[in-house]
Image: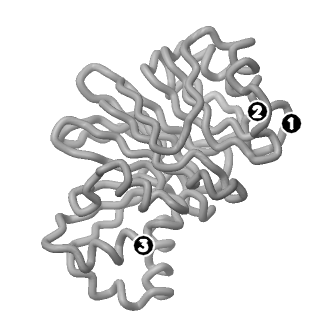
Amino acid sequence: MRVTVLGCGTGTSGPEKATSGFALQLPRQTIVIDFGVGCFKNMQKAGIDYTKVNKIFFTHFEHLDHVNDLPALLFARHVAVKPIQLEIFGGPGFKKFVENLFVAFPFFNGLGFKLKVSELESFATKKFQNFTLTTKPMVHESSSTAFRIEANGKAIVFAGDTAPNENLVELSKGADLLVVECSFAEKETSNHLNAAQFANAASRAMVKKAMITHIYPEDEDKDFKALVAKGFKGEILLAKDLMQVEV
């Protein structure tokens, strides 16, 4: 499996960073996890054919930095030549969110391809053709859901934004790669991780690699890898737009 960082920033990051989004290239298909501001253009820069992506999973949809480029993708696929069906997934309330999106953009009611909208259950495992998906709720927004994706004997966890919680540790146990936000160096909040909390989760889950993403601009000058290394002895990756990681 190959992870491409489509965006590693936050809603207030500067122009050099798109907001949250990742492409996961699996055998015979590419899926996407989150699709924030700038991710659509970075997908094209990475050489990923957006007309062939058939599944997008959203860790949450309440915040634009994780979902903003969905309308742009829908519009582009509408005018593309024979795009394949697209299925989009989110947590509780996702179908209503998409209904409201179609109210805001009535044009989408005549899309030139089949769009399927699915809500994911928490604490569930679902088998797809090329991978297995396991979900657990996170502590951020009401729809927040983390995804464990397993294929060919490897496991990657995409947790999105979250405060510390046991579900994150349990879902990530033994994963080859954990991708989760690390918004701040030291500041503690009710819905984000700092470096020590990130390290604690990665260490307790005994993951092989952990990717730091979603750093707020106020802390971008901090050495996050060094801070995380105090509590996590596995490989530490600092996400950058268009970065690729093989798992």
Q: Which residue is mark 1?
A: 187
Classify 41 as above or below 221.
Answer: below
Number of numbered discs overlaid on the protein picture:
3
Residue 93 rendering spot, x and y as whole percentages? 51, 65
What number is the disc on residue 49? none
> Dot 3 surroundings within 10 Å: few (below 14), some, or many (20 or more)?
some
Cα distance between the residues tagged 3 and 1: 34 Å
Task: Report the mark closest to the observer, 3 or 1.
Answer: 3
Q: Residue furthest bottom?
A: 106
**Which residue appears at 20% of the width and 65% of the height?**
85
Classify 190 as above or below 38.
Answer: above
What number is the disc on residue 72? 3
Residue 68 rendering spot, x and y as whole percentages? 53, 67
- What colour scheme governs how the chains and residues are painted in the rendered image of this protein? one colour
Which of the pair 36/172 is nearer the observer? 36
Q: Which residue is mark 2?
A: 194
**Which residue appears at 46% of the width and 42% of the height?**
5
**Which residue appears at 36% of the width and 60% of the height?**
88
Q: Is residue 186 left or right of residue 7?
A: right
Amino acid of disc 3: Ala
Residue 234 rendering spot, x and y as whole percentages? 56, 11
> Dot 1 surroundings within 10 Å: few (below 14), some, or many (20 or more)?
few
**Which residue appears at 48% of the width and 73% of the height?**
96
Residue 8 rendering spot, x and y as whole percentages? 57, 45
Task: Report the mark closest to the observer, 2 or 3.
Answer: 3
Image quadrant occupied by the N terminus: top left
Amino acid of disc 1: Lys
Image quadrant occupied by the C terminus: top left
Classify 243 as above or below 224.
Answer: below
